[in-house]
């Protein structure tokens, strides 16, 4: 018997209407073939209400969320899930901070033994890399981050910034004989990495680099694995050759004797101490006092030094060179998005399971109502399910694009990686906070994990680039693309071509009238494709407003370009988010087009819900820009309520389709929580 | 030399422009007397830019935030601050969960020794009670909550629900010989307390009540202090007399032998285990197996039993009786608001100090810019400073109103306590999250406390009433008031009279035109009084829309009143928040009217900033209801930017005026953080 079913018996003798049970029984496919690819009417809602998803539908959704894996990737996923069945991967809630660190390290070694990753394939099979970390999150965010630091930041820096001569380290990294960290950020220099002060001076006589920390603000800080466990670091330092500064370059610096774990001469490490979460990761600070490393330890893909001290580089422009180095490591951001969305999915799985068993208030004299039966509860949780689906589709798209990256779409990948990292992690904050609140007191129990996930993942807003800084990078890239398009200096093939061509021919003006003039009912809002036009319109208009504002501030207000940029910060953030949301919808619609007829209604309704919710969140903008008539605001709100209501019975199947490994669907409130708490030894 | 000044020298040799230093030097009061009480023009911004706040101004602001204390209350505050100087009240970041609990208990006993509170004055000097807990937060949220449970929930239940015969316990509670907890919530019954199952059956032969837990869903859960330390509980149970159920009543039940701390016969206690924060509080679960207590242990103010088993009560209607019991304890919610605002103030103090010393990016070749110089950073933090001021003024007002409560304003106090508890705790979530993000990686260090505060305070969204449920209670009360006003059945003297009379005579229509028709510049938006009209308009209109929607759903859609209510949940939440924000502004304006001329500009600009920000947050509503012309949206955004910019140099003095005890302004990033982190032993 299903655990939810058992639980429901604590409150009454009837079975609660359980959509997952129903999926097994109800295989009569309604004829949904008549639904067009994109244009969908409110019939969709009626269909949803009547139709249960079949097991085949759910399997399709699961596959879609994993990114339609081929057989190899599917077997790799199964291998990871199997490895994570070891009891060591179960949460230990009373562990002190030192114990959490030890535990995370043991887990890292355990998962390394299972050989689920290969450094040599960290880019060529990036899908596996990202999937791997998305799965580790379900066990322990600290483990996932430690692994991402070791294989992702440290490992990938060797693969992407090093050369053939560094291949010899790959095996030792894969089996964790070498344990790495990544030392870029300094106390005085975070987002502005160009300010980094650490020096690497070449000594031609000894054929060595001398790594040195010239000041207290130059100490490397927040370096994951550095306080205790790392034996090597990739250190970014300014290359000094014959008195000249060639800018930042990466160096492999041994930190500790791997046998004794003693720090090597000249190296000081300090503990970053307790954090607000993620305490399984031993973040630390590092100082280098004239530390000598062999010449071969420069990661030399983008800049090298000959024995006699002559500098060579394939990229002459120092700014372009530095950006190329950082862009080579952009994959980390994609993986951060995937990890963040795993957190969202986990939170939603927990909150929805609980909402389908917890009763509160109701008609007097009758049994109380399930939380999921309340429109307010549907309104809180179901749009977040839609966001989790929407962002997962985009993350899969970006992952695939990154894995197969060509020079042509480098800027696209850059914008996507930055923009989605920010948007997905902000969405995670909102999702976990809402899920925690939706579970009331139960959301506070560590055993129910939502709050721990929130605390452990909060860093993702800041690391791999502060979100607001990343959004500025996106806006800058959009401006460059825009200029290229309109000056005709470059043919646009990237993400923007669709938008701009559409925007340029003024289609949004037609749609604007369409929106402004038509009915106040919500029926005609159930068109995912038409809603997309609102997002294209917004992005295009924001871009033009930003350009005008920058120009005005420089011309009329006599600001420098930097001042003008800083004074447009709210526009910049709006624009970048508009870009991310527009891409999200486009990718969702492409996914729907490829999906089988029986899953089209559910996917379309999720897409529409995402679109309507995002319009509602920015209603002030759409109304003040007269994209909608004022009467539409209420119609949009009503439409959201209707879609949420139609999806209420699908909420549980939809989160089950996340396919979180069963060994991690074991928080008390996901199961028979009355029995659980009946035992005084449980918590 | 100021610590901020020292720190700035790490980055450059000039002094950074430090507004706090300037306040000591600049005593030339500009002539601000010409500013009218409420109507203020943009001149205010020019004045703000030129004028530094004097020490006297800052002292006034501090006094205002404490609620204009009399000499007695001031000395009581000093006594608490002095007591909190004991080193035991300093954070211990590496403490394990058992250690955190022990530490919080030791702190509770220590603060009890200082005799800063008296149970007999818990209501009559409620200002002190609330102030006390607001101050404890700066040391340890767990301590504050344990104290609030002991003196507030447990203690106040004896004072407010008991009678003369329970006075004998007061001293033992004050000196913590008796350590209390408050057992209302059950596993199956949270917000819906009427569902509570625990039974208290009277046995006339023994003159005893028999307390019993009839099922697993009836276990008391999340009871603070119950897992380890409490020796007594106030238990809510259904009073059974001669086979009849008289509904919930409170009983004092001994739990543990105070000497041995062994559980007494028939009592089972279980640990609620690790939580996502607040781990110094030992939340637990309780079961009672035919536990006998003396007849005198019924807290008998609202219902009593004679020796022979006859029931008596001053309130015949069981619903009214039950509500009266809960309303007697409403003070807890006021105190929760105050504690939450302490968290916001602490977070802001930390983030603003850091923003005034941390540099990032800047014009090439020049020193980097302070975070506080960025418009985006001003935009993030300064509106939150305004909210902290705005809510503190209202909290002080409610505290005072509660302390001097008469029967006439019982409903006002109820609405205020519920509504502000929800709004202030939601504002706290936003404030702490923003502050944490504004500090980047430093916001993640436990030593910088923002994240710990967030984790420790998260429960305030849920306890003392789930926020969304409280907002429903507010909306219900507003509907009752509204009906009374318009049927003329009752003269309205409460909070609504102003709104309704204003709304009723249609003043909002005039103002609506005013807003719609006039300029798109931001100049005329700098009128705090005129902005208030927008809030009155919104509240009044939402109320009318809600009434109409409820009626339509019942009449046209044939819903029951409960269904209709549930389907209006978004309107209900909107209305209640609109009420809270309107009251906040009214109280802020009253405060400004009473303030000396030299502080009027700064207070007015904070009030305007609060108003504009709240309008911006709900711009979609104002535009779709055509209160503003679309062109106003951008003007409002620009106005917010301007106010924030004008306040940038005042941010630090404004958070210094919070007057957080100096022993708690000691996180690394509030001081010379470069020196701090130069020592590898620090973190």
Image (tube, coloured by chain):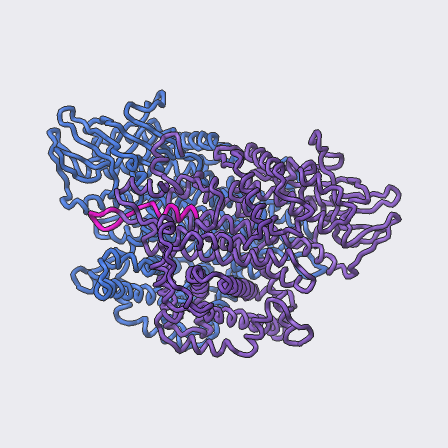
Chain colours: A purple, B blue
> How far from the left and from the top, in percent, is residue B453?
47, 43
Residue range (magenta): A348-367
Q: Main secondary structure of the magenta part?
A: loop
Q: Is residue B48 visible?
A: no
Task: Answer left or right for A244 relative to B274.
Answer: right
Residue A120 highlighted magenta (yes or no): no
Does A608 sit above or below residue B674? below
Between A45 and B496, the one lying in front of the other is A45
Q: Residue at x 68, y 45 (%)?
A: A119
**Relative to residue B194, is residue B75 drawn left or right?**
right
* Quadrant placement of the N terminus of chain A: top left
Q: Nearer the viewer, residue A349 or B665?
A: A349
Give the residue displayed 60% in from the left and 62% down from the top.
A474
* Image x and y of residue A582, in percent: 52, 65
Camera-nearest residue between B276 and B604: B276
Residue A353 lies in the magenta-colored region: yes
Could you say which quadrant of the image residue B189 lies in?
Answer: top left
Q: How many numbered markers are drawn?
A: 0
Between B34 and B457, the one lying in front of the other is B457
Residue at the (69%, 52%) spot, across then down: B12
Residue at the top extreme of this rendering: B260
Q: Position of residue A513 (x, y in %)?
A: 44, 78
């Amino acid at each position: 018997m299903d655990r939810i079913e058992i639980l429901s018996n604590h409150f009454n003798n009837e079975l609660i209407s359980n959509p997952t049970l129903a999926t097994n029984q109800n295989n009569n496919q309604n004829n949904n073939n008549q639904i067009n690819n994109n244009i969908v009417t409110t019939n969709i809602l009626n269909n949803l209400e009547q139709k249960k998803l079949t097991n085949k539908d759910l399997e399709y959704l699961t596959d879609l969320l994993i990114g339609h894996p081929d057989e190899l990737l599917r077997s790799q996923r199964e291998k990871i899930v199997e490895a994570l069945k070891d009891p060591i991967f179960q949460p230990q809630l009373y562990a002190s901070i030192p114990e959490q660190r030890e535990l995370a390290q043991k887990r890292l070694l355990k998962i390394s033994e299972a050989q689920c990753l290969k450094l040599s394939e960290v880019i060529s099979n990036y899908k596996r890399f990202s999937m791997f970390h998305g799965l580790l999150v379900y066990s322990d965010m600290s483990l996932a981050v430690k692994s991402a630091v070791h294989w992702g930041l440290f490992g990938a820096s060797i693969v992407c910034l090093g050369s053939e001569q560094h291949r010899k380290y790959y095996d030792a990294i894969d089996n964790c004989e070498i344990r790495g960290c990544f030392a870029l950020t300094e106390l005085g220099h975070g987002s502005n990495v160009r300010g980094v002060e650490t020096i690497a001076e070449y000594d031609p006589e000894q054929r060595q680099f001398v790594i040195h920390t010239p000041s207290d603000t130059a100490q490397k800080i927040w370096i994951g694995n550095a306080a205790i466990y790392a034996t090597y670091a990739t250190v970014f330092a300014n290359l000094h050759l014959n008195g000249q500064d060639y800018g930042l370059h990466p160096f492999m610096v041994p930190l500790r004797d791997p046998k004794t774990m003693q720090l090597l001469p000249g190296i000081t490490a300090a503990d970053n101490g307790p954090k607000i979460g993620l305490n399984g990761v031993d973040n630390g600070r590092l100082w280098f006092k004239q530390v000598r490393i062999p010449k071969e330890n420069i990661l030399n893909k983008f800049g090298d030094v000959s024995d006699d001290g002559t500098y060579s580089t394939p990229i002459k422009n120092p700014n372009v060179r530095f950006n190329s180095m950082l862009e080579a490591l952009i994959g980390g951001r994609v993986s951060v998005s995937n990890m963040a969305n795993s957190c969202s999915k986990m939170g939603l799985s927990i909150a929805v399971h609980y909402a389908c068993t917890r009763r509160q208030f109701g008609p007097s004299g009758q049994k109380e109502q399930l939380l999921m039966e309340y429109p307010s509860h549907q309104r809180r949780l179901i749009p977040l399910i839609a966001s989790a689906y929407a962002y997962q589709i985009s993350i899969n798209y970006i992952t695939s694009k990154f894995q197969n990256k060509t020079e042509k779409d480098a800027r696209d990948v850059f914008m996507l990686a930055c923009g989605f990292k920010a948007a997905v992690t902000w969405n995670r904050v909102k999702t976990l906070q809402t899920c925690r609140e939706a579970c009331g007191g139960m959301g506070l129990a560590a055993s129910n994990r939502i709050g721990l996930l929130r605390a452990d993942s909060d860093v993702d807003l800041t690391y791999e680039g502060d979100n607001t800084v990343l959004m500025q990078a996106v806006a800058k890239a959009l401006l460059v693309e825009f200029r290229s398009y309109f000056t005709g200096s470059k043919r646009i093939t990237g993400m923007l071509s669709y938008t701009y061509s559409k925007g340029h021919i003024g289609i949004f003006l037609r749609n604007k009238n369409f929106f402004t003039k038509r009915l106040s009912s919500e029926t005609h809002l159930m068109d995912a494709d038409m809603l997309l036009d609102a997002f294209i319109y917004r992005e295009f208009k924001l871009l033009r407003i930003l350009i005008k504002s920058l120009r005005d501030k420089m011309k009329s207000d006599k600001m420098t370009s930097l001042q003008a940029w800083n004074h447009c910060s709210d526009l910049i953030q709006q624009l970048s988010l508009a870009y991310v949301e527009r891409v999200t919808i486009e990718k969702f619609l492409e996914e729907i087009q490829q999906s089988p007829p029986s899953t089209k209604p559910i996917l379309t309704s999720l897409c529409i819900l995402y679109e309507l919710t995002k319009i509602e969140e920015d209603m002030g903008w759409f109304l003040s820009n007269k994209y909608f008539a004022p009467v539409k605001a209420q119609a949009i709100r009503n439409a959201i309520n209707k879609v949420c209501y139609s999806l209420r019975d699908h909420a549980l199947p939809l989160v089950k389709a996340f396919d979180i490994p069963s060994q991690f669907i074991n928080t008390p409130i996901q199961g028979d929580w009355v029995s659980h708490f009946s035992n005084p030894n449980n918590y």
